[in-house]
Amino acid sequence: MQLDLILNTKLTLGVIGDYLGYSDQAHFHRVFKKIMGYPPSSVQREIERIQG
């Protein structure tokens, strides 16, 4: 669900983390990176690069 929200919405990482119940953006970032192996911000940057 985390990745789906990043890929398919224009929501900020802070809003996504809050929506998913994380106490703060840093906690969301740590958990995402631990599970996925890369930070959520890198996903957003890659989407922006591809979409121009």
Image: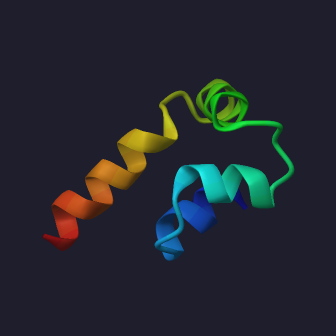
| 3 relative to 40 in the view: left or right | right
| 36 relative to 27 in the view: left or right | left
Exactly how many numbered labels are in the figure?
Answer: 0
The picture quadrant where one finds residue 2 is bottom right
| 50 relative to 27 in the view: left or right | left
- How far across and how far down the image is residue 23, in percent? 83, 37
Looking at the image, residue 33 lies above or below residue 28: above
The quadrant in which the N terminus is found is bottom right
- Residue drawn at x 76%, y 53% is 18
- Residue drawn at x 48%, y 30% is 38
Which color scheme does this rendered protein use? rainbow
Looking at the image, residue 39 lies above or below residue 47: above
Looking at the image, residue 26 lies above or below residue 25: above
Q: Nearer the viewer, residue 19 or 50?
A: 19
- Residue drawn at x 54%, y 27% is 37
The quadrant in which the C terminus is found is bottom left
Q: Nearer the viewer, residue 8 or 14?
A: 14
- How far across and how far down the image is residue 34, in percent? 66, 24
- How far across and how far down the image is residue 25, in percent? 65, 38
